[in-house]
Image (cartoon, coloured by chain):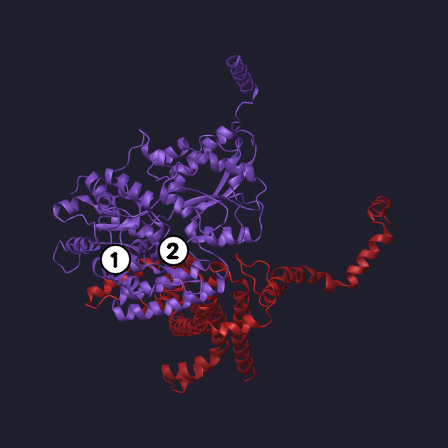
Chain colours: A red, B purple
C-alpha cells in the first residue's frame, strides 16, 4: 500500500517533463562534450589564443612604441634572427646552462637519493633540510646568492681567501658568470631530482637485489647492473621535467646577472624578454618565441621517445 | 578744447578698463571629485615630497591622486605597455626625457601642453615657465627638434661627487677640481688601516654594473671631450664611443674603479653603492645628489655630518654636469587631461616646489633656490647642486630611440674598461659596439631629428665656479 502523502510530495517536486527531459537527455547524449567544454574553453583562452597571437605577431614588424601600425613582413623575422649574433649566442647559453645544471642535478640527486634510501639516525631531519631549497622562492634565493657572490664582501670569496685562493669575480666576469648561475641552479633544483629518484628507488622490487647479494655481487655491480637499469624510467621522467624547466629558467638569471656581463648569461628567453619589453621589438621577439617553443618541443619529443623505447624494453 | 578732448578720451579709457572682466584666475577645485592615476619611480623623493604633497593636493583641489610607484625598470615597462595599448586609465607619468623622452615623443604618446600653459583658467598667472626654470633643466626638456613641449621638468637631480670632508682633512688631501687631482685623491684615500693588504676605506666608488654605468660615466665622458654620439656625414647621428677622447674617458673611469673601488661595484646598483659609502667604506662616491639624504641620516649612516657634495672634476674639455632630470607628462590617451595638467601646474608652483627643495630634493625652479626659507643640507651640496642645475645637460644616456640597446652597448665597453683596462681591448670593444650603435641608429632614427646633447649646446662653466662648492664648504 503506497503512502499517499509521499506520492503527493513526489508529484509536487517533479519538474516540467518536456523541458527538463529535453535538456537532461541532451546532456546525457553529449556527456563527453559537456565535460570537456571547461577544459577546451580554458585551453583556447589561455593557450591557443595567446599562442595564435604570438604566431600572428611574428610575421609583422610591430614595435611597441615606435611602430604600432605593423605591417606583414612575411618570414623576414624568422630569417633575420639568425643574423643576430646575440641570439645565436643565447641559444648556446641556454643549452650550456640547461645541460650543466641538469647534469649536476642528476649526479647529486642520484647520490642523495641513494643516501636517503638507506637507514641512518636522523634521516627524516636531514632529508627535510635537503629539500628546503626546492620550496624557496627563486627571487628570494637569488638575492641571497647575490650577497654570497659579492666580489669584495661576499661569503664565497671570504672562504676562498681563508684557504689562500685568489678571489673570483663570480657574476661580474663573463667567464665566471655562467658557472655561478649553474651553481645556483644545481643548488636550487637538486632536491627535486632527489625527490623523484628517491620515490623511484623506494618503488623498486626487492627480489633482484636479494638475488644479486646472494650471488655475491658488489655494491658497485648492484648499482650499475640492477639499480640504474631499473631506475631508467624514473631518471628519464626527472630529466624531461628538469630539462624543460632549465631551458626556461628566467627569474634567477634576471635577478642575479640580468643576462650580463656582456651578454655572457643571456639565454633565449632573456633575449626574447629584452627584445620585447626592453627594446620593444615585438615582431622579432614573437618570432624568437616561436623558435624557442620549437626547441622545447624538440627536447620533449626526444626524451619522450627515449622513455617509450625504455618501456618497450 | 584739445585738452578737454584728451581728458574725455582718458576718462573713457578708464571707464572701459573698469568694465573689463577681471583677470581669469585658476579655480583649483574645478575638477573636484576626480581621481587621477599616475605611475612613477619608487625613489626617495616620492616619500619626501610626492606623497605628502598628494595629500595637500587632494585637500586643496578635491582631486585624488592614485600614485603607483615602481622600480625604474618595471615602471618604464608598465608605462610603455599602457601607452602602447592606449590605456585611458593612465593619466600622468613620471619620466626622464633623456631616457625615453625621444621615443615617447616620436610615438606621440605624450600630450602637448602649451595649450594648457597658455590657459589662464588652468595655469596661475605667476607660473612663469620657462622664465623661472634653471638653464640646465630647460636643456633637458626638449629631445626632438621641432616637437611641441610635452612635459614639465621638475627635478634637478644631478650626478655629483660625494666626498668625506673628514678624510680629506685628516689626510690633508686636496679636494679635486680636475681629473688628475681626482685620481691623486683616490690613490691617497685608498687606506689600508690594519696593513693586511686590503683597504678598509676605498678611495673612489661609482657605478660599474652594465648599462647602469652610463649615468655615472656621462660627466667623465663629456669632460674628457668624448660623447655618446656625433653628427654623421649622411645626416644621421653615429656612435662616438670609439673616438680617442671617449676611449680616454673609458680608460680613466675603468682604472678608477679597478684600482680604487671595491670590486663589488661591478655588480652593485646605486643603492648598494650608496649603502657602502654611508657605511664608511669609501672616501668618494660619484652618484646622484639625493643620496646625500642617506649619508647624512644618523640612524642609517656612519658618516652623518662628514659628507658633502662637489661637482665632478673638470676634464680637458671642461665641466659638463650630468643632469638626468625628471619630468611629469600627461598621457595622450587620458580622459582627464585638464585635471592632469592642473595637478602638474599645482605641483610645480613655487610654494609647492619649495617644500621639496627644503626636503633636499633639488628643484628646477630658480626662485626656490633663492628663497630665504631654503637652507641647503650643506653649503657645498647647495652650491654644487645649483651649479649643476644651471649648467647641466642631459647626457646620462645616449639619447636614442633604441635607448636600451645603446646603454647595453656602452655597458659592454665599460665592463672591458674596468676588468681588462688595456687601451687596445677597450678600443676593440668600442669599435665593435659602435657598429652595433650605428646599425641601431640607421634602423630606428631615419627622419628623426634629436635635439642633441653635445657640449656645444651647453654653457661653459668657469674654473671659479668649479671651485665654488669647495670654497662654500671652507675646504680649500
Quadrant of the frame with the C terminus of chain B: top left
Q: Residue at x 50, y 77 (%)?
A: A233
Name the image quarter holding residue B386. Answer: top left
Q: Is residue A301 left or right of residue B404?
A: right
Closer to the camera in the image, A267 or A194: A267
Q: Which mark is residue B144?
A: none
Secondary structure beneath disc 2? Answer: loop
What is the x, y in percent for residue A159?
Answer: 24, 63
Residue B391 position (above or below residue B411): above
Q: Chain of mark 1?
A: A
Are the residues under badges 2 and 1 in a single subunit?
Answer: no
Q: Position of residue B348 (x, y in %)?
A: 43, 36
Depth check, front residue: B423 or A290: B423
- Secondary structure category for the residue under label 1: loop
Q: Position of residue B113 (x, y in %)?
A: 51, 41
Which residue position holds label 1?
A: A153
Q: Is residue B240 left or right of residue A25?
A: left
Chain containing the residue with disc 2: B
Residue nearest the observer in this picture, B162 or A113: B162
Q: Which residue is mark 2?
A: B397
Q: Is residue A244 visible?
A: yes
> Looking at the rendering, which quadrant does residue A137 occupy?
bottom left
Residue at 33% of width from left, 50% of height from top?
Answer: B322
Relative height, residue A136 to residue B64 (above, below): below
Q: Residues within 10 Å of mark 2 (few under 14, many from 20)?
A: many
Q: How many marks?
A: 2
Could you give the CA–CA distance between mark 2 and mark 1, rounded to whole angstroms? 30 Å
Mark 1: few/some/many CA within 10 Å (<14, 14-19, 20+):
some
Picture quadrant where residue A105 is located: bottom left
> Relative to B129, does residue A306 appear above or below in the rendering?
below
Label 2 or label 1, whichever lies nearer to me, is: 2
Q: Can residue B297 be seen at all in this image of the molecule?
A: no
Amino acid at each position: 500500500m503506497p503512502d499517499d502523502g509521499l506520492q503527493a510530495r513526489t508529484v509536487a517536486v517533479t519538474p516540467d517533463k518536456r523541458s527538463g527531459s529535453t535538456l537532461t537527455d541532451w546532456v546525457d547524449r553529449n556527456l563527453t562534450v559537456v565535460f570537456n567544454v571547461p577544459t577546451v574553453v580554458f585551453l583556447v583562452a589561455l593557450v591557443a589564443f595567446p599562442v595564435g597571437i604570438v604566431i600572428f605577431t611574428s610575421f609583422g614588424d610591430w614595435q611597441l612604441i615606435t611602430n604600432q601600425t605593423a605591417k606583414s613582413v612575411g618570414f623576414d623575422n624568422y630569417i633575420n634572427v639568425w643574423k643576430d649574433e646575440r641570439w645565436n649566442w643565447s641559444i648556446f647559453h641556454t643549452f650550456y646552462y640547461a645541460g650543466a645544471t641538469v647534469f649536476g642535478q642528476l649526479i647529486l640527486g642520484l647520490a642523495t637519493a641513494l643516501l636517503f634510501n638507506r637507514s641512518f639516525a636522523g634521516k627524516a631531519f636531514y632529508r627535510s633540510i635537503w629539500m628546503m631549497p626546492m620550496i624557496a622562492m627563486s627571487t628570494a634565493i637569488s638575492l641571497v646568492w647575490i650577497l654570497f657572490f659579492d666580489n669584495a664582501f661576499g661569503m664565497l670569496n671570504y672562504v676562498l681567501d681563508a684557504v689562500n685562493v685568489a678571489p673570483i669575480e663570480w657574476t661580474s666576469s663573463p667567464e665566471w658568470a655562467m658557472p655561478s648561475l649553474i651553481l645556483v641552479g644545481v643548488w636550487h633544483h637538486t632536491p627535486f631530482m632527489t625527490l623523484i629518484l628517491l620515490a623511484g628507488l623506494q618503488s623498486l622490487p626487492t627480489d633482484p637485489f636479494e638475488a644479486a647479494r646472494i650471488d655475491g655481487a658488489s655494491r658497485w655491480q648492484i648499482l650499475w647492473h640492477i639499480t640504474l637499469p631499473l631506475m631508467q624510467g624514473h631518471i628519464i621522467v626527472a630529466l624531461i621535467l628538469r630539462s624543460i624547466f632549465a631551458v626556461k629558467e628566467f627569474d634567477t638569471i634576471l635577478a642575479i646577472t640580468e643576462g650580463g656581463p656582456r651578454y655572457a648569461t643571456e639565454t633565449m628567453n632573456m633575449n626574447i624578454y629584452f627584445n620585447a619589453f626592453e627594446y620593444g621589438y615585438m615582431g622579432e621577439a614573437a618570432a624568437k618565441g616561436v623558435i624557442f617553443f620549437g626547441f622545447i618541443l624538440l627536447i620533449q619529443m626526444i626524451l619522450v621517445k627515449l622513455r617509450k623505447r625504455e618501456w618497450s624494453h | 578744447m584739445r585738452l578737454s578732448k584728451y581728458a574725455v578720451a582718458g576718462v573713457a579709457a578708464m571707464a572701459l578698463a573698469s568694465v573689463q572682466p577681471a583677470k581669469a584666475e585658476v579655480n583649483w577645485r574645478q575638477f573636484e571629485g576626480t581621481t587621477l592615476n599616475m605611475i612613477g619611480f619608487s625613489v626617495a623623493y616620492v616619500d619626501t615630497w610626492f606623497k605628502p604633497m598628494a595629500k595637500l593636493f587632494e585637500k586643496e583641489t578635491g582631486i585624488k591622486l592614485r600614485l603607483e610607484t615602481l622600480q625604474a625598470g618595471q615602471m618604464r615597462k608598465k608605462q610603455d605597455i599602457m601607452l602602447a595599448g592606449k590605456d585611458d586609465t593612465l593619466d600622468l607619468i613620471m619620466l626622464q626625457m633623456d631616457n625615453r623622452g625621444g621615443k615617447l615623443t616620436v610615438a606621440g604618446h605624450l600630450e602637448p601642453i602649451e595649450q594648457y600653459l597658455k590657459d589662464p583658467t588652468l595655469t596661475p598667472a605667476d607660473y612663469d615657465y620657462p622664465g623661472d626654470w634653471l638653464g640646465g633643466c630647460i636643456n633637458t626638456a626638449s629631445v626632438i627638434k621641432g616637437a611641441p613641449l610635452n612635459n614639465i621638468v621638475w627635478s634637478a637631480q644631478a650626478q655629483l661627487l660625494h666626498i668625506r670632508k673628514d678624510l680629506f682633512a685628516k689626510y690633508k688631501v686636496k679636494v679635486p677640481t680636475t681629473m688628475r687631482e681626482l685620481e691623486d685623491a683616490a690613490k691617497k684615500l685608498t687606506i689600508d688601516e690594519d696593513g693586511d693588504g686590503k683597504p678598509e676605506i676605498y678611495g673612489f666608488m661609482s657605478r660599474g654594473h652594465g648599462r647602469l654605468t652610463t649615468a655615472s660615466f656621462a660627466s667623465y665622458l663629456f669632460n674628457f671631450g668624448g660623447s655618446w654620439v656625433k653628427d654623421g656625414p649622411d645626416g644621421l647621428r653615429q656612435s662616438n664611443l670609439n673616438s680617442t677622447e671617449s676611449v680616454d674617458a673609458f680608460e680613466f673611469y675603468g682604472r678608477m674603479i679597478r684600482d680604487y673601488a671595491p670590486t663589488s661595484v661591478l655588480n652593485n646598483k646605486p643603492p648598494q653603492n650608496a649603502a657602502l659609502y654611508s657605511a664608511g667604506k669609501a672616501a668618494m662616491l660619484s652618484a646622484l645628489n639625493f643620496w646625500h639624504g642617506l649619508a647624512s641620516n644618523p640612524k642609517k649612516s656612519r658618516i652623518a655630518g662628514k659628507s658633502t657634495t662637489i661637482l665632478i672634476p673638470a676634464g680637458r674639455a671642461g665641466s659638463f654636469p650630468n643632469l638626468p632630470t625628471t619630468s611629469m607628462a600627461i598621457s595622450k590617451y587620458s580622459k582627464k587631461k585638464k585635471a592632469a595638467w592642473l595637478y602638474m601646474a599645482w605641483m610645480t608652483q613655487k610654494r609647492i616646489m619649495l617644500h621639496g627643495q627644503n626636503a633636499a630634493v633639488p628643484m628646477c625652479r630658480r626662485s626656490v633656490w633663492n628663497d630665504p626659507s631654503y637652507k641647503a643640507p650643506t653649503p657645498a651640496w647647495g652650491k654644487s647642486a645649483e651649479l649643476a642645475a644651471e649648467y647641466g645637460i642631459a647626457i646620462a644616456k645616449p639619447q636614442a630611440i633604441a635607448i636600451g640597446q645603446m646603454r647595453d652597448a656602452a655597458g659592454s665597453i665599460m665592463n672591458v674598461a674596468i676588468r681588462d683596462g688595456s687601451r687596445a681591448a677597450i678600443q676593440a670593444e668600442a669599435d665593435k659596439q659602435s657598429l652595433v650603435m650605428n646599425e641601431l641608429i640607421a634602423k630606428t632614427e631615419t627622419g628623426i631629428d634629436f635635439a642633441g646633447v653635445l657640449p656645444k649646446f651647453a654653457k661653459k662653466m668657469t674654473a671659479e665656479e668649479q671651485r665654488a662648492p669647495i670654497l662654500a664648504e671652507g675646504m680649500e
